[in-house]
Amino acid sequence: MKPIAKIIHRTYASYLPTAFPAHYYGMPNGKIFLVFSRFYEAAFGKSGLEFVFAEHKEFAYDYKNDAIVSTSQQTQQTPVFAEQVDYPCAKFNVFNINRDLNSYGEAQVFMNEQAEKMTQIA
């Protein structure tokens, strides 16, 4: 079976710096990646849409058990619901900004490619 990025949460209104939807994915290496889109200025008076890919720093993902885990020492034993990954002032590191994608479907293909690379390394 080909490894895939598992979508764990979709939100149409998020706390991220965008007015567009955000998607959160559980990855085979235990990380949670997120993708959202935003406008960028392509030229004076013209804009385009870019997709931002980032790694969530405060949550991890148990791929085998399909569960979200907090990386905080205080809340490690508390169950985490999918909606909790999207909150104000979330910490994440951007690892890719792509201006060639046209949809969230294409972004999901990119995430699946990342998931496949993770399993080849391991």
Image (tube, grey):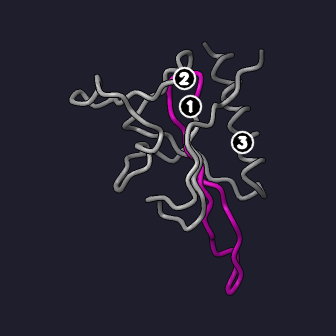
- Name the residue carrying label 1: 26
- Name the residue carrying label 2: 66
Q: Disc 1 residue type?
A: Gly
**85 relative to 61, above or below:** below
Q: Disc 2 residue type?
A: Asp
User: CA separation, marks 3 and 2?
Assistant: 18 Å
Magenta extent: 26-53
- The disc, 2 or 1, on the residue closer to the chain's N-terminal end is 1
- The disc, 3 or 1, on the residue closer to the chain's N-terminal end is 1
Q: Which residue in the rendered view is the most extreme toward the bottom?
A: 45
Residue 31 in magenta? yes
User: CA separation, marks 2 and 1?
Assistant: 8 Å
Q: Position of residue 68 (x, y in %)?
A: 45, 29
- The disc, 3 or 2, on the residue closer to the chain's N-terminal end is 2
**Image quadrant in which you'd find residue 78:** top left
Residue mark closest to the camera, 3 vs 2: 2
Q: Residue at x 36, y 28 (%)?
A: 79
Q: Which residue in the rendered view is the most extreme toward the left?
A: 74
Residue 121 in magenta? no
Q: Position of residue 1 (x, y in %)?
A: 77, 15
- Name the residue carrying label 3: 108
Q: Residue at x 63, y 70 (%)?
A: 39
